[in-house]
Amino acid sequence: MSRDRSLRDLALAVTQLTVLTLPVRWPDDEKPDVASHYVWAGFVVGAAAYGPLKLVELVSGSANPYPGLIAALVIAGWGAFTRLRHWDGLAGVGDGWFGVDPGARRAIASESHVGAFGAMAVLLVALIEYAALTIILEHHEMVLLVMPAFSRCAATFAAWLGHPAKPTGLGAAVVRKPGVRGAISATLGMLVATFLMTWGHHLHGLVQALVALVLAAIVPHLVAKRFGGVTGDVMGASVLLVETVLFVMAAVVG
């Protein structure tokens, strides 16, 4: 029964964070430990870019000759594959950041239209990710697979360590202390991501993995503090902010 529940929570995590709709539904009588499996959903997101890239290289017989074009396609593809969920959260947090109090900030963030601050936040993050990816694609393509997993840990830590800002919404639905199986699943996913990150880049990869986990724990706390707790927008924005910093670090460190 517990095993079936863990598989269900994993399927829910993938369904929540991607366009993949797995045959599973949110139970009415319990609160799933879905956030503990977000790191694995991150691997699915990463594979959606890393897999096709390696296939193209295999078929063409050469490394990608157009890093700028591929970087743009990766960002656009990830946006489509995740239904722009994280980008929507980033736009909401950007618009609401300068509200007079946490309640006003949440109200602004939840509005359907995007204001100047939200649009600028999305633009800047997209440009920075694009610039970093054009460099990364030339020397460390494994980052495409691993960094989305690390960045989704921000949502996991937000759910584990935070408190919901309001009684309804994604934040209230997923915020909870992890169960034993959930903690094991998340830890295993983080270890796999760390192992892959250090493959061929031992010291640099280990440092980047440790920084990634520290950022994943700190960034959602700082954003949630501004909004009075964890919301879906806070989690989405935290994922992208962590991801962007990690891409920049990978581009600079190599």
Image (cartoon, rainbow, N blue to C red):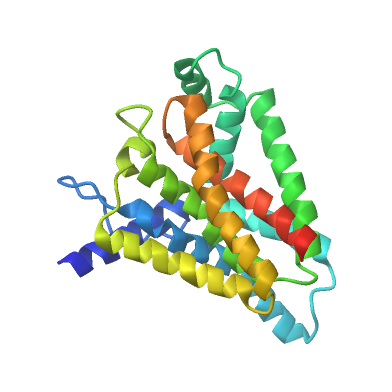
| Above or below, 238 relative to 104 | below
Residue drawn at 65 percent across, 66 percent down: 143
Location of the C terminus by quadrant is: bottom right
Q: Position of residue 77 (x, y in %)?
A: 63, 57
| Above or below, 169 relative to 132 | above
Q: Position of residue 116 (x, y in %)?
A: 69, 24
Q: Depth check: 75 or 227 in front? A: 227
Residue drawn at 56 percent across, 30 percent down: 93
Residue drawn at 48 percent across, 29 percent down: 225
Q: Depth check: 158 or 90 in front? A: 158
Q: Position of residue 135 (x, y in %)?
A: 81, 62
Residue 245 visible here: yes
Location of the N terminus by quadrant is: bottom left
Asked which quadrant contains residue 74, the reply is bottom right
Question: Which residue is the extreme one toward the right?
Answer: 65
Asked which quadrant contains residue 171, the reply is top left
Is 236 left or right of 184, judged from the image as shown? right
Q: Position of residue 122 (x, y in %)?
A: 67, 38
